[in-house]
Amino acid sequence: TKKKDKEGGKKKGKSRDNDAKAALKVPKGMRDFDPLEMAIRERVIGRVRSHFERHGAVTIETPVMELYSTLMGKYGEDTKLIYELKDQGGECLALRYDLTVPFARYLALHRVSSIKRYHISRVYRRDMPSVARGRFREFYQCDFDIAGNGAPMVADAECVKLMAELLTDLPIGGFLIKLNHRGLLDGMLEVCGVDEADFRPVCSAIDKLDKEPWDKVRAELIAKGCTEETCDLIQGFVVLNGEPAALHAEIVASGRFASSERAVQALQDLDMLCQYMAALNIPEGAVRLDLSLARGLDYYTGVIFEAVLTDGGSKVGSICGGGRYDTLMGMFLPNPKNGVPCVGFSLGLERIFAIVEERERAAGVVRASKTDVLVASVGKGMVGNRLAVLARLWDAGIAAEHMLQPNPDLRKQLGKADTDGTPVVVLVGEDEWARGAVKIK
Amino acid sequence: TKKKDKEGGKKKGKSRDNDAKAALKVPKGMRDFDPLEMAIRERVIGRVRSHFERHGAVTIETPVMELYSTLMGKYGEDTKLIYELKDQGGECLALRYDLTVPFARYLALHRVSSIKRYHISRVYRRDMPSVARGRFREFYQCDFDIAGNGAPMVADAECVKLMAELLTDLPIGGFLIKLNHRGLLDGMLEVCGVDEADFRPVCSAIDKLDKEPWDKVRAELIAKGCTEETCDLIQGFVVLNGEPAALHAEIVASGRFASSERAVQALQDLDMLCQYMAALNIPEGAVRLDLSLARGLDYYTGVIFEAVLTDGGSKVGSICGGGRYDTLMGMFLPNPKNGVPCVGFSLGLERIFAIVEERERAAGVVRASKTDVLVASVGKGMVGNRLAVLARLWDAGIAAEHMLQPNPDLRKQLGKADTDGTPVVVLVGEDEWARGAVKIK
């Protein structure tokens, strides 16, 4: 067939891979980025990086592939989404699914005991792509993590501070950071009479409360073996949310968690976190303690947080999330107890790109080229003259270009400068050239 | 086994992939990059990008994977080096081998008729890794290409200008750009009596002249069917090299190529190129016309160039190479004649990283962190005070950090500032705090 599928993976259709001419497309769920999209992405990444660097973070890179064994047993059901490579008589390799497991592997391999690092790079998931929901098979992750033993809650508080900084600075509207603690969550389930073996499945039901009504979640809890009484008790807890210090004081005063040792410990952590957040001058109202926040991943061990956008309805949902995971690195060591505690978060860069792109396109301010000068010419046979002017500009460090045609029409040259948003046009004409001059527009 | 293979793919050894604990390593021929290495890489990339952008180039990104059919038939024998993915019931996918074929695919898919773009990203080759020769299975490519119909030799001349600009600016020592033309090369073989069917294999023998003596190359030519007389004639040509305009004039005056139409056309191209290079103010002696330059790849159709480093012996060899390829994009179109002519080059970024890293480490100037201030404290219980000072700095846009420990030793804090190269230490002490002051070192 001669018909081209310009949308690549975005359109449904039979695989025509065997027909080289017909298969003019990109892999399913993947995308090319044109210069305008790249300009927006690089600008956003630059802005995000400047915040990480302001906090003294350094960056690392790891291979896009890992041994399959490194990824095995880390993602639960999602393991089926991992891209595996053909075994070509060597190692069993797979493309990375996220940046967190490679980070833990990096810490273990290089025996790093303390680092504050960010990592902005692409990851791969054989998920069902959905353009509408911004879900792709190849996409950017943007992680910030602090690894190392330190004073309790200091790194956790810095993560919240940095999230607030980033989300305030990026032009993506209002936000709210929800906060909870795995110890408080587990203590809550304990107090409500949930069996410890059911903690994770019950948590994953509670995690859906930001998308589904209580009745639906309650039905799932019943199906997972909770009694009606337990459900009532859980409901009484998960509705709790408010300004962290105030809600914390209220919860402690109520004594509702007094019977759970891990909840008491978690409340001490949260008390310290509230003090540090105050010292860090995090904007009033930016953070809420929310007992319904559960986070899906198993590996969190302490504070968890998640930021949601509050403008534009619930369309974009969670934009940033993370928490403390003190045991992941240990999984790569002969003695897991030698693992370094970590806390960090992942910023939803693809969603931010989409929001910024929509805003900038609407405002008409997007520009791909960084050229300052277009060297235009009038009259025939002026190529060499244009090049001589260009060389002067380039050698002086000035970003300049010209049209490749031998004798381009003046109207076309000015039109190009206009379309590209090039601020200056240097006009080379025969008469001026004879006088050693050019016109500047 | 509990022994760790810290070197990843660098060491030989049996695959132990089935033992999760033992397989603490990265895939063969691949590398992690630590913060110091990343700082150097990002600095070099930033410098290279600024040159591309000075020439009005924009950037694009393509997926790290392509349909296998897109890569098929483009790399000759090297096709066996392509990483294929497991067919998981969908498309046959492979990791990109270079950035040139994806660029041609991009132009065809999006019907781009004119673009000046650069692309700095990683590519994958299942080659035999060699740390000594800087050959890896995952490495950066850095391509600059101009696609579009324009005045002859204008884009080609800009490529040479940009190569000279880059190699002058990067701290990698002296360089020499060799220049030739596929038409002149083919015309030379024609004049020497080589059969047209043997042009490419004979070219690939001549291409070895920068590494091997004439006797060895001559033997290969004989083995490929050249007569003794043809060899003598070829030898008389390939020794020709010199300042482009002068050598061009000499060759034209000699009339040695007069019988080959394509050589005559190529000489006209080279004449125009010399004029444009003069207009572009390319440093004297930076470029030589060299009739032994052949370049391995089949797809070149016009001017070819290659830069070599002239300091530090022949250790690093070719650092940059490219040429005109007017037919590659057409291979992706129903009518190949609709393809857009292209010219461009690839900069050997990994080698440049290695040279810069060696120089900077020797000079002791490498620094991974961009932090300006370390907030240190004296006395116990000062975490909250440090955080309050940090918040003031962060909120003012100043890059600052502190040690995570609750009560770090002053000596350790100053030692960290020294090691990291942090220029300013803000010292928070109880007495000063009471007065609302800090000490600055």
Image (spheres, coloured by chain):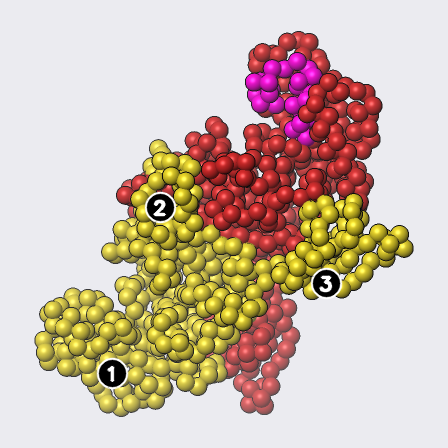
Chain colours: A red, B yellow
Disc assigned to residue B239: 1
Q: Which residue is mark 2?
A: B94
Q: Which residue is mark 3?
A: B424
In which chain is the residue bearing label 1? B
Q: Taking A30 as reference, is B237 above or below it?
A: below
Residue B247 placement (x, y as % from top left): 31, 87
Pointer 1: residues within 10 angstroms few (<14), some, or many (20+)?
few
Q: Secondary structure at mark 1?
A: loop
Q: Secondary structure at mark 2?
A: strand
- The mark nearer the N terminus, 2 or 3, is 2
In which chain is the residue bearing label 3? B
On the image, which quarter does residue A345 sit in?
A: top right
Do we see residue B343 in this rendering? yes
- The mark nearer the N terminus, 3 or 1, is 1
Name the image quarter holding the N terminus of chain B. top left
- Cα separation, mark 2 vs mark 3, equals 49 Å
Do we see residue A357 in this rendering? no
Q: Decide if residue B334 is on the left or right side of residue B415.
A: left
Q: Taking A180 as reference, is B164 above or below it?
A: below
User: Is residue A431 magenta-colored?
Assistant: no
What residue is rendered at 35% in x and 84% in y?
B244
Q: Secondary structure at mark 3?
A: strand
What residue is rendered at 89% in x and 52% in y?
B434
